[in-house]
Image: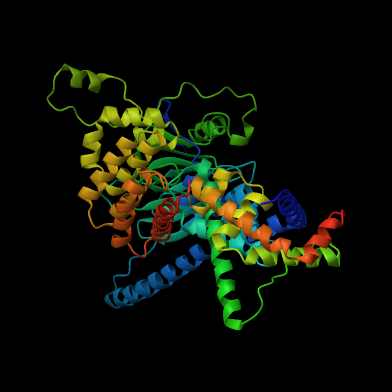
Amino acid sequence: MSPPVQPRAKVLHLHAPSLLARLRAREPEAAGELFDLHAATVERAIAGVIGPDAELEDLVQDVFLAGFRGIDAFRGDDATLGAWLRGIGVRMALKKLRWRRRRRWLSWSGTDTLPALRAPTDTRTQAALGRAYGLLDRLPDLHRAAFGLRFIEGMQLDEVAQSLGVSLATTKRYLRAARERFATLAAADPLLADWLDDRGAP
Amino acid sequence: MSHEHRDRVDGIVARMATAQQRERARDAEDRHRRGRARLVEAVEAPAARDGGWWRAGGLAAVTAVAAVLLVWGLWPAALTYTVSADGPQPDAQGYVVAERDRPRTLQFSDGSAFELHPGTRVRVGERRRHGADLELDHGALVAMLESGDDASDSTWAISAGPYHVVLRGTAATVRWDGRDAFEVEAHRGRAEVRGPGIEGTRMLEVGERLVRGAAAPSRLAAAVTAARGDEPSSPDAVPADAPAEPAVEPIPRRTPPARAAGPDRAARADAPAAADWRSLARAGDYPEALAAAEADGFAKLCRTLGSDALLELADLGRYARRPARAREALSALRRRFAGTEAAAAAAFDLGRLAGDPPEGCAKGRAWYETYLRERPQGAMAEAARRRLEECDDAVAARADGAP
């Protein structure tokens, strides 16, 4: 069986669609590729806001699902997908912080939170890190997020600003305020002082 | 902050950073694999569920209609098909496979037939009185249909990965490698193609071939050549050093018929078609895309484009660093589509175009307030509120004498 023989066909090249186009076409494998490309960025952003956390993996998952489902609202291109997801991650992490804060307030529990560290650390380091993250908990959410993203995760200033959806000037103001406050609180904590005197790695 | 305090903070932060990095490095690969699998599964599931509901609803409706038609004795018989005996019977999922060394044929009761190229895997889905749906898992198939003109109620459709082809003629070849290479050629009549990289629907005319996948053409061409009965007989038989495709003709741009006009317009109509501003924008060539939009008549585009396209045009203005053009498109959108979601988004974008707070507060504030008034629960509402707060902060800081 053969179709009718005809002169060589005119070829119309369909460019390989961009990742964004495939995401908009709801290709599941495109979601996998998106994850491959940006999971580390998103994880780092969330950890910057909430620290080591047992829910980190779930939050990363939520970010990618939200991104995949909301891809039609995304107005950038392939090159800006990572920054967009990072922004979603930061917003979700901030929401989680606020939710926990409200829950703690309702349950009258203390403010100290112990980081969910699974990598081997000694008890003293665990305790000191717990105190340090406890101090972060006492900063306003946006200040804490800026502090974590910039100083703990080492993000560039413009990345921090973009992730928080604020200007560079505002980011700098948050960072200055967060650092001052953190320093004041840390100065009053004897356990952290002892810990710093110990030159061993955490 | 004293030096001692600064060192103290730096020390604590350094240790927190190390702890976080160590934590993330732990089981990183497993975590990634797990997260990826979860995500792909989750995004596949809703589609299946939606399809399930749709199918369930469709099934109920079809059952009801069938009952009525049976009573009247008018039940239209769906086509049946047979598979040539030179290979295994359909597997448990209903897939028909052509072995790697020989083609197979799916013969339908109306005389239509599909030739499966060696190595092809395909499944017949819904069958109708005049047509059927085929799902091409991978491989190439040649359709030879008995009745396929536009006027008839014949509908033959082939899905191949993310692509969907509706045959509007009587002969066509479709190929899909199961990953990303895709090709359709209309031999007799037309073929309608939808999928990634195609805006809306692409209608292929006789003799046109649509190709996706840069590495695939020679193999794909071989499949088509084979479909015509020439050598080689199988895509896999093409040597690795097979000559590249001959010169490729670009997709012709649809130019509107020239109205009675002066020599300039006539000359433009005769000139080689310029690239489409949207294609250029999507390819990331923003200055060129904007130049193309301006050549088409920017003001005319603002008067005629739909709301989504106007947002795209505004984005193009922003990316090409021509904010005045972005504003022009957004203002047209707000004027022409007042009260819509897109108009509200345009208000937010106009705010953003004024610049980030605090510098952009003077002009941007009114736009953010407009957005919140029009869409208090909208997708940008939180961002608009935050920007307004930053503007308030800036005013307060200025009142406090901050730099």
Q: Whole-percent x and y of residue B378?
A: 37, 61
Residue at x-position 28% and y-position 48%: B307
Residue at x-position 41% and y-position 25%: B249
* Residue sitting nearer the eye, B77 or B305: B305
The answer to whether residue A45 shows anywhere in this view is no
Residue at x-position 50% and y-position 34%: B224
Q: Whole-percent x and y of residue A54?
A: 69, 67
Which part of the image, by quadrant, shows the C terminus of chain A?
bottom right
* Residue sitting nearer the eye, B165 or B42: B42
Q: Whole-percent x and y of residue B67?
A: 33, 77
Judged left or right of residue B83, residue B308 is left
Count the marks: how many?
A: 0
Identify the image quadrant of residue A109: bottom right
Residue lying farthest to the left in this orientation? B260
* Residue sitting nearer the eye, B84 or A89: A89
Colour mapping: rainbow
Q: Whole-percent x and y of residue A119?
A: 80, 61
B91 above or below B183?
below
The answer to whether residue B291 shows anywhere in this view is yes
Residue lying farthest to the bottom in this orientation? A107
Identify the image quadrant of residue A134: bottom right
* Residue sitting nearer the eye, B391 or B91: B391
Identify the image quadrant of residue B222: top right
